[in-house]
Amino acid sequence: MSLGVKLKSISEYYQQQITLVMDVLFSTYYILKNEYIKIRDLLSSKDYQKRYTEYIKIIDQLEKSADGTGIYLSEQHQDVLEKHREMRMNIPKSEHLMNMTLVYLMALFEGFNKKFFLTLLMNKPEQMKNRKKTINYEKLLEFDSLKDLHKSLAEKITNELGYRDIDNFNNFLLERYKIDLKREFKKWETLKDNYYRRNIIVHNNGRI
């Protein structure tokens, strides 16, 4: 199989994965949105507004009552309370869905980069030439073949990509392939913002 075919198959695989993630996002968001609209319309109805007003009055009376005073909520009032709770929970669900989608998409982005460059470097080992990097004889003798050596070096380089942030990844492309995403990729700022937002979600529980 030619290098071009190998790289194309990698690209197609990750495109399929991205499509799958986005399909799940849209279908799930559609369900959540419909649930929200259904509950919102229900709570906006005159009947539910009347029940909610009654519920607020009961709670207000409870707050003004002596300690230890109990109240009885009818099934209708309990239903009003449950619908409001469901509506409040719907928004965090949507935010969580968006956050997890972003995390997964960025994982695919990094997975694609690693697989793409591992394949490229193993098939084009001359691209790994670097006068600043050396390897001793003892290490060289550990490999049974030149192919094994190339694989080890390629894995080392691509594994290091996983520890680079998005700006350092751009520096990697610029140094090795004269590709500057900052200048050549129109969505660079969006990609960069999403990359660092993903880090916040993963490492700081979404709190900025």
Image (cartoon, rainbow, N blue to C red):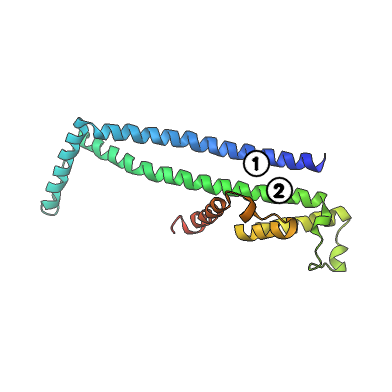
**Mark 2 residue type:** Lys
Give the number of the disc on residue 202.
none
Q: Looking at numbered disc 1 in the image, what kind of residue is underneath it?
A: Tyr
Give the residue number, with chain letter if any, for mark 2: 115
Residue corresponding to mark 1: 14
- Estimate the spatial distance between the alpha carbons at disc 2 and disc 1, rounded to whole Å: 10 Å
Instruction: Describe residue 165's horizontal placement relative to residue 64 as left or right.
Output: right
Measured as percent of width and height from the top left, residue 205 is found at 46, 56
Q: Is residue 15 visible?
A: yes
User: Is 164 situated above or below 191?
Assistant: below
Confirm whether residue 165 shows in the render: no
Residue 114 x, y percent position in the rendering: 69, 51
* Depth order, front residue of 89/114: 114
Residue at 42% in and 42% down? 94
Name the element at disc 1: helix
**Is 68 or 120 nearer to us in this picture?**
120
Residue 115's x, y, as percent? 71, 48
Q: How many marks?
A: 2
Sequence order check, earlier mark of 2 and 1: 1
Q: Mark 2 touching mark 1, by CB under 8 A?
A: yes
Q: Which picture quadrant has residue 2?
A: top right
Quarter of the view holding residue 144: bottom right
Q: Is residue 54 above or below residue 144?
A: above
